[in-house]
Image (cartoon, rainbow, N blue to C red):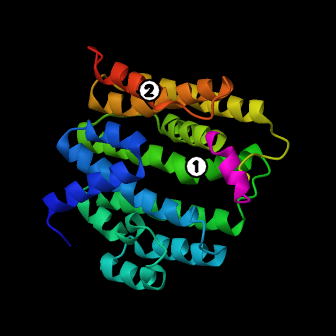
Amino acid sequence: MKDTSSLHKEAMDMLLHTSRTFFIPISLLPSKLKETVAAAYLCMRAIDEIEDHPELPSDVKIHLLHTISLVIEESNLNNKLNVLFEPYKSVLPEVTLRLADWASLCPVSMLPNVKMATARMSKGMAQWVSKQWKIKSEEDLNDYTFYVAGLVGLLLADIWQWHEEVDTDRELAVAFGRGLQAVNIIRNRTEDLSRGVNFWPDGWELDDMFEYAKRNLALADTYLKGIKRGPIFTFCQIPLVLANATLDAIKAGHQKLSRTAVADLLKGITTSPTQ
C-alpha cells in the first residue's frame, strides 16, 4: 500500500476520472470527511464497474460480485482481491483493480460501515445480474435502486452521523439515492437498451418513470431540509439540483444538461452566501 498522502491524491484523480458530478461536491468537503466519502464512493464505483462491464459474461460478473461481498470484510483484503482479479486484469478498469486501496484510505472507525455497505451492494448487484435485470414491477425497481443507490444514501447517513453527529431520516436517505438513480435510468435509456438492459417496469412509459423520479427527488428535498447549511448540505444539494435540472432538460427534448448549464448551476450553489 502507498502512503496516505499519495493515495489520497490518486483517489481524487480517480474520482475526477470516474465521476465529474461527484468530484465537485466531494472536493468541497473538509479534509477528513472528503477522504472518507471519496473512499466510500470509489469502493462502490469499483463494483459498479463490474456490474456494468460491457465485455464480462454474466457468470463472471456474478462470481466477482458475490466473492467481493464475502471477502471485503475479511483481513488480507488486498491479497484476496489480487487473486480474485488476476484472471481479469486485462479487462477490469483501474478503479476496480484498486478496490483494496480505496478501502484502506477510509478512517479505521468508519471502515466497517463502508465495507458492510459495499458487501451488501455487491451481493445485491450479483443477484440482479443473475436475474438479467428483468424488472417487472415498481417493487422490482425499488429493490434494484435500493442496492445500487439507496445503500449509498444509507452509508452517507452513517458518515454524517459519525463525523458531525448529523442525524438524518434513513428512509429519506434511501429516497435521496433512489431519486438520483432514477434520473440516471431515464438519461441512459437509449444506451441501456442498446446493450439489452431494460430497467423500466413492464408497461411503464416515460411519464411513469418521470413520476417515480420526481416522487423520490421530492423526498430527497425533504431529506435536505433536515440538514443544516454547511459542507454536508452543499454536498447533498449539488447532485439534487443537477438531477432536477436534468429531468427538466430531458422533458424539454434535450438528452442531457449542457456543460454551460451545469457550470451555471454549480456556480450558483458554491458561491451562495447562505452556504
Residue 104 among magenta residues = no
Residue 155 in the image, given as x and y percentages of width and height: 41, 48
Q: Which of 250 and 128 is in front in this view?
A: 250
Q: Mark 2 points at which residue?
A: 260
Q: Is residue 145 visible?
A: yes
Q: Which residue lies furthest to the top in this view?
A: 273
Q: Earlier in the sequence, mark 2 or mark 1?
A: 1
Left or right: where 244 falls relative to 99: right
Q: In which quarter of the image is residue 128?
A: bottom right
Left or right: where 53 falls relative to 262: right
Left or right: where 107 falls relative to 248: left
Image quarter (top left, top right, bottom left or bottom right) of the N terminus: bottom left
Residue 55 in the image, given as x and y percentages of width and height: 60, 71
Q: What element carries label 2?
A: helix
Q: Is residue 160 above or below residue 58?
A: above
Q: Mark 1 points at which residue?
A: 146
Q: Which amino acid does label 2 sit on?
A: Thr
Q: Is residue 107 visible?
A: no
Q: Which amino acid does label 1 sit on?
A: Phe
Main SS category, magenta section? helix
| Cβ atoms under marks 2 and 1 closer than 8 Å | no
Magenta part of the protein: which range? 187-197
Residue 25 in the image, given as x and y percentages of width and height: 33, 36
Left or right: where 69 falls relative to 29: right
